[in-house]
Structures are given as structure tokens and as C-alpha cells.
Image (cartoon, helix red, strand yellow):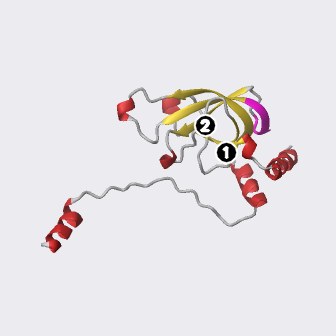
Amino acid sequence: MKPYILAFFIFFIPITNAIGCSCIAEKESLRKKIQKEFLRSDVIFTGNVIAIKDFNTHPTRSSSRDPIQYTFEIIEQIKGVDTKREIQIISERSGSSCGYRFQIGKTYMVYAITSNHHTTTTGNQIDYSTSICSRNNHVARVSKKEKRILKKLSQNQR
């Protein structure tokens, strides 16, 4: 009887392609990791989260890939041409889709790239997008060494 049960599971249970978020961690020095992320990012800043906008209006049909828009009040601009006092950053709803969850009232260092992935939802021509694979972190957890490296990279870019 056991072979029949096994055959049932193999042939009659649907197989889904569930792929979660995966960030590749390379064995490199902190300096090298920061340099790579600096070059990859279009904008880097520290800022306070002042608003959160959830674009999903149907909570029963939510997806981990739904975009969330975080509005930041910029404290320090490290990289980017954006000279605004506020900036909107898009990330997916859930970590399973690589989304980074920011909390309102908290201060973060944010690394973001330009993207048009969610522009049909946000209504923007272009968005700044980030993920858990970026070096985003609470500003209090960012090491002094990382701040020094970023400052030097920023100065060299000018």
C-alpha cells in the first residue's frame, strides 16, 4: 500500500515554483562590499520615515510583491542628484519578495536604485527602489567605518 501513497504524492499533488528572496553574500571585505553597493546605488542617504503608503486596496488579495512607498525626510544626502528635502522609496511588501520594511518615525541609511518596476502602480515615471539585499540599516547600526568609507567615496565622485 505504501508505494501507492508515494505515487499519489508524486503524480497528483501540484508542484509550485515558490521562489523566495535570495541575497548572495560574497566573502569580501567591508570596504569592498560598500564600494560595490555605492557604485550600484543611484541614491544613498540617511533619513527619517515620515509616511508610509500601501498601494494595495484589497487586503484579501495582497501579494508579497505589492509595493509599499516610504516617504523619508532627508537628513544627509550621500549620493545622488536629488536635492529635495523629502524622497519616496519603493520596496516590496514582504521579505519573501526581498522587500525591506521601514518603520515610521525611525531613521535609516538607505541605498536605492532607479526603477520603473512599479511605476504603473505608483503613477510615477521612475521610482527609487530598495530591497533587503541592499545595505539599508537603522542609522544607529551603521558602523563608523562604513560612514567614513561612504564619505570618501562621495567626495571622490564630485
Label 2 residue SS? loop
> Which secondary structure, mark 1?
loop
Q: Circle 1 sits on which residue?
A: 136
Residue 66 lies, in percent from the top left, at 46, 37
3D distance between C-alphas at marks 2 and 1: 9 Å
Q: Within 10 Å of the Cα at label 2, are there few (<14), some (14-19), or many (20+) other Cα atoms?
A: many
Magenta stretch, residue numbers: 74-81
Instruction: Please state if 101 lies on the left or on the right of 97 as rendered.
Output: right
Residue plotted at (58% across, 42% down): 100
Q: Position of residue 59 (x, y in %)?
A: 39, 30
Q: The C terminus lies in which quarter of the figure?
A: top right
Residue 3, by quadrant, is bottom left
**Does residue 8 appear left or right of residue 71 in this picture?**
left
Nearest to the observer: residue 81 or residue 19: 19
Marks 1 and 2: in contact by CB < 8 Å?
yes
Residue shown at 83% from the left, 45% from the top: 154
* Disc ID at residue 13: none
Relative to 110, say whether 37 is above or below.
Answer: below
Determine the residue positioned at 75% across, 47% down.
142
Asked whether 150 or 108 is in front, the reply is 108
Of pointers 2 and 1, the one earlier in the residue sequence: 2
Residue 64: image location, x then y, percent: 45, 42
Residue at numbered disc 2: 102
Q: Amino acid at mark 2?
A: Phe
Amino acid at pointer 1: Asn
